[in-house]
Image (cartoon, rainbow, N blue to C red):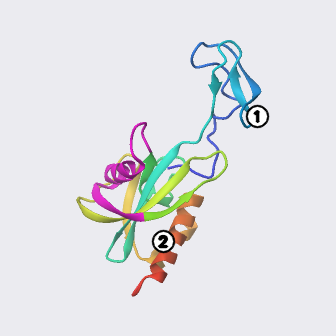
Amino acid sequence: MSDGHPHPFLGPSTIRFCPLCGALLVLERVPPDHREQQVCSRCRFVYYLNPKVVAATIPEQDGKVLLTRRSINPGRGLWTFPGGFVDFGEAVTDAAARETFEETGLKVDLTGLLNVYTYPAAPVIIVYTARVVGGTLTTCDENDALEWVSASQIPWDVLAFQSTREALRDWLATREKKPGG
């Protein structure tokens, strides 16, 4: 999962040709808001460069959360929670459960929307709390370690992304509000 950092090769200045007809794209102000967009100089197709959506979970079990250590960039060697891009035609909630299973081997039920995290030139990250309902804890190609940690064990100095830090702070705040939390 990536956030807080612009994608190294995607941006309005790097998209130069129309995906429909191949003609040159040019910046023009487009109604109704008259914001500058890439417009095809031939067929007039407007190429809107919109953020991707990431769905993630903070799996909870016995008062602990599951963290994954990334084995790929961005964030190689740093800790986060399971998550990834929502596929076209997929519900965000389904993507959150799917990504959690793919990255951890665990089946989860979503227990609530924690928050939505958004940063300029980065994906929109939608994070849910979740409880484990099955599966076997297993690493995948994207991580090399999985660890259940209590609130006091969260490795703040080696978290992968700004959204990881903010979501874990939000998770801690919701726990403090719960009776016995």
Please state which amino acid type lies under the numbered disc 1.
His
Count of numbered circles in the view:
2
Q: What quarter of the picture does the C terminus occupy?
A: bottom left
Element under label 1? loop
- Left or right: residue 61 compared with residue 52: left
Q: Which mark is residue 65?
A: none
* Pointers 1 and 2 in contact (C-beta within 8 Å): no
Return the residue nearer the eye: 53 or 33. Answer: 33
| Of callouts 1 and 2, the N-terminal one | 1
Taking 73 as reference, is 69 above or below it? below
Return the residue nearer the eye: 173 or 112. Answer: 112
Return the residue nearer the eye: 110 or 156. Answer: 110
Q: Give the farthest residue toward the bottom.
A: 180
What residue sits right under mark 1 in the picture? Answer: 34
Identified at 42% across, 39% down, the residue is: 87
- Left or right: residue 119 compared with residue 36: left
Identified at 76% across, 26% down, the residue is: 27
Gap in angstroms between the C-alphas marked 1 and 2: 39 Å
Q: Give the range drawn in magenta.
A: 86-112
Which x, y percent locates residue 8? 63, 38
Taking 87 as reference, is 159 above or below it? below
Rate crowding at label 2 as few (under 14), some (14 to 19) or many (20 or more) other CA atoms within 10 Å: some
Q: Give the farthest residue toward the front.
A: 32
Please state which amino acid type lies under the numbered disc 2.
Trp
What residue sits right under mark 2 in the picture? Answer: 171
Q: Is residue 95 magenta?
A: yes
**Residue 162: quarter of image:** bottom right
Q: Does the magenta stretch include residue 19?
A: no
